Amino acid sequence: MNLYDELIWRGMVKDVSNVDEAKKLLNEKSTKFYVGYDPTGESLTVGHLVQIVRMKYLQKHGHVPVVVIGGATGLIGDPKETQERKLLTLDQSLQNAGKIERQIRTLLQGNTIFVNNYDWISKIDTITFLRDYGKYFNIAYMLAKDTVQKRIDVGISYTEFSYMILQSIDWLHLYQTNDVKIQFGGSDQWGNITSGLELIRKVVGENDAVGLSSPLLLKSDGTKFGKSESGALWLDENMTSPYELYQYFFNASDNDIENYLKLLTTLEHEEIDELLKVSREKPELRLAQKKLAEEVVTFVHGKEKLQIALEVTEALFSGDFNKLNEEAFKTLEKVLDKVELSNEMTLVEALIKGNLASSNREAREFITTGAVSLNGEKVTDLTYTMGIGNKVHSRYVILRRGKKKYALGVF
């Protein structure tokens, strides 16, 4: 397969403005392509991995990613389907932009160009914006865009209506000054991508710019990819731990695993095919899910964080926490119910605070029947206080009820 056909096989292409030109550019070497990220939050989510992994995959095959951080467009807001976005302040936008840029830099090692569209859009005054750019955009053309149509009934401000013009300016600027030939984006960005192509055509004339979109990734049951029971999954480890990220992908359904391997890893065709073959033969081993989880966590957080995630996973399965280092216990603080302990607190009180018992009576019953252990040692004394026993790493106590119910006590 050539690289374009490989992207098709991986499900990384939905719309393409010019198939022949796309094949030509992708089959050359060192073609510059760009993906934009508006700094609407302090961290990217797992949903952003589709575009990031595609950048990494193309980089692996000799092309040059240009990452556009939307310090300016983030101040305007890409139209949401249902309502206006809450506007960020300039300080918020620039701070978020810095955090997101640092996040992507850790993921795209090697030949990558980073730019911030605030650097050129902020220099365009109102008259220039209207005369040099606005005159190229027909209102009927803009109203026909899917993102605008979805907002017509509920209303859309001129601020968000003008977003596609700003994104089009980005591509014109990058095409003229950085020789960027391709723009990638999710299928929800196709209207903005084609608007940029139109602006380049009207300003430059004949050109070799190409737009490609990828399908939005949904689970096989139709629910949104990247959402857990506790909410969005973030790439910032302080917001979503590597352990939680590992568990999300390890527990992926068999129906989703092929898409995830193709879209969220840079594993090559043959390795993915082999993984899927073995998984179909022995689904109970969950080998494909395990490989997927390992690849994603390693890519986002590195091998050391993956090792901690694996050790925490094993400890929660086996009940043996003795081998965990202090950093692993910090992970447990994020994933288990946490109880702030004192020397005088009774075990009964600790069980209730850790959601291991719903009442004093129930807590006493669990203790007397031998269902409760602290750091692996059973405790049947109803008068037990938390300052009596040993602490792991001088401050932690693993409270356990039954086989699989845990809480983490912290002094």
Image: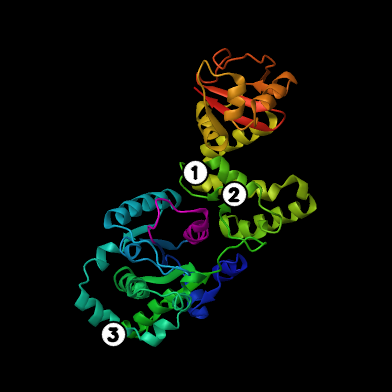
| Boundaries of the magenta span | 38-61
| Residue occupied by mark 2 | 229
Estimate how packed mark 2 is, as few (under 14), some (14 to 19) or many (20 or more) residues with alpha carbons within 10 Å. few
Please report the residue visible at 42 percent of the width from the left and 52 percent of the height from the top: 104
Q: Residue at x 59, y 55 (%)?
A: 267
Instruction: Work out which quarter of the rendered image holds the N terminus and state it.
Output: bottom right
Give amino acid for label 3: Lys
**Observer-nearest of 13 and 368:** 368
The type of residue carrying mark 2 is Glu
Q: Position of residue 273 (x, y in %)?
A: 69, 58
Q: In the rendered image, is residue 208 in sight?
A: no
Image vertical order of residue 107 relative to residue 353, above or below:
below
The prevailing secondary structure element of the residues shown in magenta is: helix
Amino acid at circle 1: His
Residue marked by disc 3: 135
Is 55 magenta? The answer is yes
User: Which mark sits nearer the N-terminus, 1 or 3?
Assistant: 3
Q: Assign a secondary structure to mark 1.
A: helix
The reply to whether callout 1 and callout 3 are in contact (CB within 8 Å) is no
105 or 78: nearer the eye?
A: 78
The residue that appears at 30% across and 55% down in the rendered structure is 94
Residue occupied by mark 1: 301
Residue 72 located within the stretch drawn in magenta = no
Gap in angstroms between the C-alphas marked 2 and 1: 22 Å
**Residue 98, horizontal then vertical, whole percent:** 33, 51
Q: Is residue 226 left or right of residue 149?
A: right
Q: How is the image coloured?
A: rainbow
